[in-house]
Image: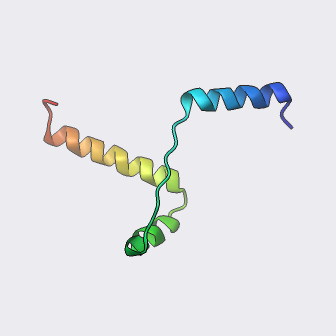
Amino acid sequence: MASEAQRRASARYQKLNVKSYTIAFYPKDKELHEWLCQQESKAKYIRELIRKDMEEHMNNNPDE
């Protein structure tokens, strides 16, 4: 079990360094939500999609 000092240090680190976002799925996006729920790691899946999109963008727009 973590000590109080360790919990405070972790909370401070997360406050300063970790970014999080919330996404809402409306009824029209039901199939998107269902697909995401099938993924083993939702955060990993989303990060991989973003990285792929970034790579494609850089390959299509090398001067930017």
Give the quadrant of the C terminus: top left
Q: Nearer the viewer, residue 41 or 33?
A: 33
Residue 6 lies, in percent from the top left, at 78, 27
Residue 39 lies, in percent from the top left, at 50, 63
Left of 59 or right of it: where is 47? right
Q: Is residue 51 above or below residue 46?
A: above
Q: Tell me the residue at 64%/27% (across/down).
A: 13
Q: Nearer the viewer, residue 28 or 43?
A: 28
Q: Quadrant of residue 54?
A: top left
Q: Tell me the residue at 14%/38% (across/down).
A: 61
Q: Quadrant of residue 28?
A: bottom left
Left of 1 or right of it: where is 62? left
Q: Tell me the residue at 61%/31% (across/down).
A: 15
Q: Is residue 35 above or below residue 47?
A: below
Report how many numbered discs are placed on residues in the image: 0
Residue 24 lies, in percent from the top left, at 47, 61
Q: Coloured how? A: rainbow
Residue 22 lies, in percent from the top left, at 50, 52
Q: Is residue 26 above or below residue 5?
A: below
Left of 36 or right of it: where is 55? left
Q: Tell me the residue at 86%/38% (across/down).
A: 1
Left of 46 or right of it: where is 59? left
